[in-house]
Image (cartoon, helix red, strand yellow):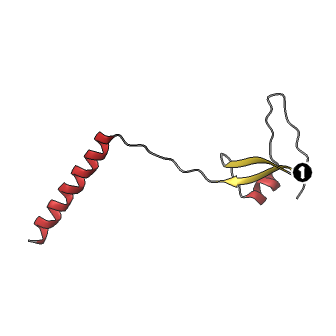
């Protein structure tokens, strides 16, 4: 599929609905733009949130796991 797309003053462009549908990209979706020998390659992207925990937060998780294990063992008795 080919599409001619105009870049506005702010440097943004709008992908036509048919092209978004072909790429499987909905409103708010992410795409990766990279250069290739043929020009610009656009492909769908998936992003995942990453949480980085402090040592204190990890200690809280460990304590909660320990407490859960204790309660489960008590329930079996």
Please tell me which residue is depicted at 59% across the width and 50% down the height of the picture: 47
Identity of the residue furthest to the left in this view:
77
* Closer-to-camera residue (26/1): 1
Residue 66 vs 5, above or below: the answer is below
State whether residue 7 is above or below residue 4: above
Q: Quadrant of the C terminus?
A: bottom left
Element class at badge 1: loop
| Residue picked out by circle 1 | 3
Residue at the location (18% across, 55% down)?
A: 67
Q: Is 27 left, or right, of 50 in this rendering?
A: right
Q: Residue at x 54, y 51 (%)?
A: 48
Residue 64 location (% of width, % of height): 23, 52
Where residue 32 appears, as percent x and y from the top left, is 71, 48
Residue found 79% across the figure and 35% down from its top:
12
Rendered location of residue 11, percent (x, y): 80, 32
Quarter of the image that includes the N terminus: bottom right
Residue farthest toward the bottom in the current orientation of the protein: 76
């Amino acid at each position: 599929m080919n599409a001619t797309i105009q870049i506005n003053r702010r440097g943004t462009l709008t992908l036509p609905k048919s092209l978004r549908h072909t790429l499987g990209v909905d409103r708010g979706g992410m795409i990766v733009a990279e250069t290739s020998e043929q020009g610009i390659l656009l492909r769908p992207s998936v992003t995942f949130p990453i949480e980085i925990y402090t040592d204190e937060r990890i200690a809280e998780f460990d304590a909660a796991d320990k407490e859960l294990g204790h309660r489960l063992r008590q329930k079996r008795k």
